[in-house]
Amino acid sequence: MKEKVKKMFLLSLCLVFVLSTASVAFASDRTEVDEEEAVYTLGINNYMDSFEFCWKVHENIEEWAAKYGFKTVYAEAEMEPERVKANLDTFALQGVDAIFEFNWLTDVTAKFVKEHPEIVMVTGDYIVDGAYYFGANQYQAGVVLGRYLAEQVGKEWNGQLDAMVFAACYQCGELLIQRMDGILDGYKETFPDFPEDMVFRFENMGAEGQIVNTKRIVTDFYTAHPDMTHIVVGTNNDEGGLGALSAVETMGKEENFFIVSHGGDTPFHEKMRAGKGDVWIGSVAYMPERYGEFMIPWLKDILDGKDVPREMSPEHFVLTADNLD
Amino acid sequence: MTKAVEQECILEMKNIHKSFGGLKALDGVHLDLRCGEVLGLVGDNAAGKSTLMKILTGFYHADGGSIFLDGKQVHIDSPKVSKRLGIEMVYQNLELCQNMNVTENLFLGREIMRDPVLRFLKRNQMDKKSVEILHKLKIDIEEPRKRVDKLSGGQQQAVAIGKAVSFDPKMLVLDEPTANLALKEIGKVLDIVLQLKEHGIPAVFISHRLDDVFHVCDRILVLRGGRRVTVKKTSETTHDEIVRYMFLGAEEEPQSA
Amino acid sequence: MHEPRETVAGDVKKAGFFRFIRKVDFSGEIVSIFIALILLCVFFSLTSPYFLTIKNILNFTMNTSILGLMAAGLFVAMLIGEIDVSQYSILALSTAIMVILIRRGMNSGLAIATALCVSLVCGIINGTLVAFLRINPIITTLGAMMVYRGIAFKITEAQAMGVTGNFFSAVGSGRILGIPVSVYIMFGVYLLVHVILTFTAHGKRVYAVGGNPEASYISGIDVKMVRFWGLVVSAVSAGLAGLIFVSQVGATVPTAGQAGLLDVVTAVILGGISLSGGKGKIVGTLIGVLILAVLSNGMVLLGVQGYYQQIVKGLVILMAVFVDSIRGGGFK
């Protein structure tokens, strides 16, 4: 008897579920949303807020979206292609007017752009056919950093450099790679004869994270090359810079290393204030805390149908201990 | 059954040796089983009873010695081979799949299939056959699709025996079949063993419960410390004598009964 | 001696609907997680106007078909008492090879077959190491995960690579009677697994080896081969999921699954499988997959922040286990 009651209860639940689904679904395919004062609706498909850069970008976009009367809907995809697609589909379902896509996956975004030409797609820090681009010119940021590096090597080391070690997320895609290539090219504008075989590239993404991996890379590299006295470590973000700094300090080889990084974020600021500017000589700023300030007005112009450039970038400059404030 | 048939050997295990690392588990053990008889195999813990039978059923491989079935030497490499030779064993821990039902356990490895490739089961036919098997053994299990872990100890034992006897075995080994059972259930299991004997299936009956051994067995073989001590006809020995052999061994060479 | 009872297997009282109900499995774990799924759906339909729409339901079902396919394969491996954490890496590798071949001019059909063969080879490697060389499956598939992923990175130079074609369009965007093709594929695979596990000797042996490998060995079952095939099935399901992946995403992405690696295992465990093997129903895994899909979809609709999503996912899993323990008499 108990079994029968249990089964009938479950069946009733299923029946309620099916009927309610059917009635809502057949009544309308899309429920009417409250008509607020919202000018436009912006979907933000972020990488993840626990990544500082992305969090700053997200915060600033939300702030400026509110100022301009945008309604926002938010999701994270952690650079998982399936989740990117699922989130974009959900945004489309919710009737967004524009999407800020910040997961650096070209193909899945391009596919969505083709399937949804009515939605304005703005990709952050990566280029997709058919989409608008807002973000760093990553190669150019690298070049700016490389030029500064060359200046410092010339001034402090008389132009002597034994090796350039790049510890970066090479698996993260072409734009990340361009950051590092930019450093080398910028450096070579001053020192064109710097040999390619003295450039070492290592992958620093992995289960232990970029800080630990970069520390290990730098330590192992110096162990294998104890005779080198002038080494530059370049990283694609400030996390990597932290790892490199930790390795150098642990080995007690501050006079033998320069560290340069991309980002100019909080970790870099803290180390500059702690007096580490002689080793970690610079970080090229991407200004995540101003993304919204630049992007939202430009996006509103796009949505209003004005003629605007399809690309927009913030300025890049090298943050150092001297110009931090 | 004629006396001549009774005395014919169906199984001979000669000079069986087995070691586990430095431990000598069996040291030149001989065993013979005759048609239609139930042979009791007794001994204290670590006497080598289960080891000897696991060699017979292919679970272990002997380090030395030979096995003859119906006069022909056989090499038993695995349980699969022993089954093919018609040797079935009911293990002390039953070796049933608790997550599966009665039918599935009875037919495990020998399912009735519609085709050899996709191996779709003839479930209804298997269920019917399960009921027949259990009915023959006078076992009261209502639902052959009942999961084995829902059965009592005695019922599980019966299923394990049913599994062993349901495919026309040549001989049977029962390892402590009454060890964990209540009194009522012990009686049922012993009845089953006697039924099998009536049907002419010879068996080796391992038990530390001498009452049970004396109840069902025709002869009793005693092992001690991996060696054969003696073998006696049940009608020509007593509990006390067997116990003495189990714990004290024998001074002279064992006699074949 | 008492009289045996006359019994007939599967007493059928009434035909049709009630016969079906009697035969449907309402085992404890399934009921609990099904209730959890329904409660989740009710919650999200009350809190978001978009949740309970056909489009949304089809969307999240379609988008979960990749995870769903891998979970079906992993379920078989876990039923045998194994585990495979290399599935996403196999997906990355097999799709990388397929896309590279297509871009170099190979016929799509041949490239797709090659991808499936690659996943099969990965499964054979995993299966050989675990079943025949007796290496622990977690260690084996962890190592394999890194190797396959590393090869995928190497051959793609860590770049995503796009691909187009009729097959991918049909699978990725195609619909039959309004339902996405990938949904049919996913449900088709679940049905196939159910049929094999329930109605064939292959399936019974999977349960047997998972429940009691020793008894299975004694019964004459080739336990090593069953274990071997379990890992092969898991790998091939990843290869199949890879085809859906490329169809939906439009590319091979060598980093795919690095963040979502545990979701597959979570879905299978949520479905009520016994971690030691031998117990579980494929329908439970399907419900587990749908629970994760509903959660992800619902939280996006509600705009829930990323770290809260982790907390919510964990709480739902605990709730499902809690409900199950109550049903199991934990509060008697």
Image (spheres, coloured by chain):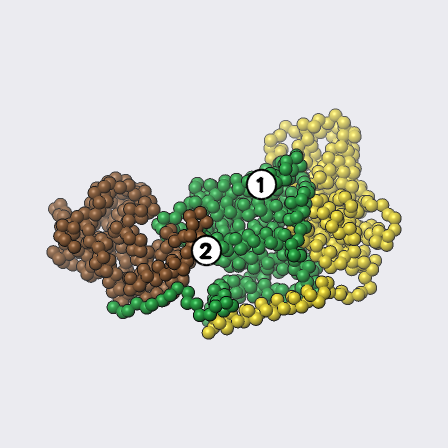
Chain colours: A yellow, B brown, C green
Q: Residues within 10 Å of mark 2 (few under 14, many from 20)?
A: some
Residue depicted at 69% across the width and 65% down the height: A26
- Residue B187 picture quarter: bottom left
**Residue nearer the viewer, C1 or C66:** C1
- Residue A4 x %, y %: 49, 72
The subunit carrying tag 1 is C
Q: Position of residue C89 (x, y in %)?
A: 58, 44
Query: What residue is at 43 percent from the left and 45 percent from the top?
Result: C225
In the image, A61: left or right of B216?
right
Q: Secondary structure at mark 2?
A: helix
Of label 2 and label 1, which has the lower sequence position?
1
Answer left or right for A149 relative to B118: right
Q: Which residue is mark 2?
A: C199
C297, A145: nearer the viewer: C297
Q: Residue at x 82, y 50 (%)?
A: A294
* Residue C88 percent across, percent down from the top left: 58, 46
Q: Amino acid at mark 2?
A: Phe
Q: Residues within 10 Å of mark 1 (few under 14, many from 20)?
A: few
Q: Amino acid at mark 1?
A: Ala
Taking the image as drawn, is residue A188 in sight? Answer: yes
Residue at the (79%, 47%) spot, across then down:
A132
Question: Observer-nearest residue: B34 or B27?
Answer: B34
Q: CA distance from mark 2 to mark 1?
A: 28 Å
> Chain ID for label 2?
C
Give percent across and percent down for residue A41. 78, 58
Residue A74 seen anywhere in this rendered image of the structure: no
Disc 1 on helix, strand or loop?
helix
Residue C290, located in which quarter of the rendered image? bottom right
Report the number of numbered marks. Answer: 2
Q: Give the number of the disc on residue C113.
A: 1
Say whether residue A139 is left or right of residue B19.
right
Q: Are marks 2 and 1 in contact (CB under 8 Å)?
A: no
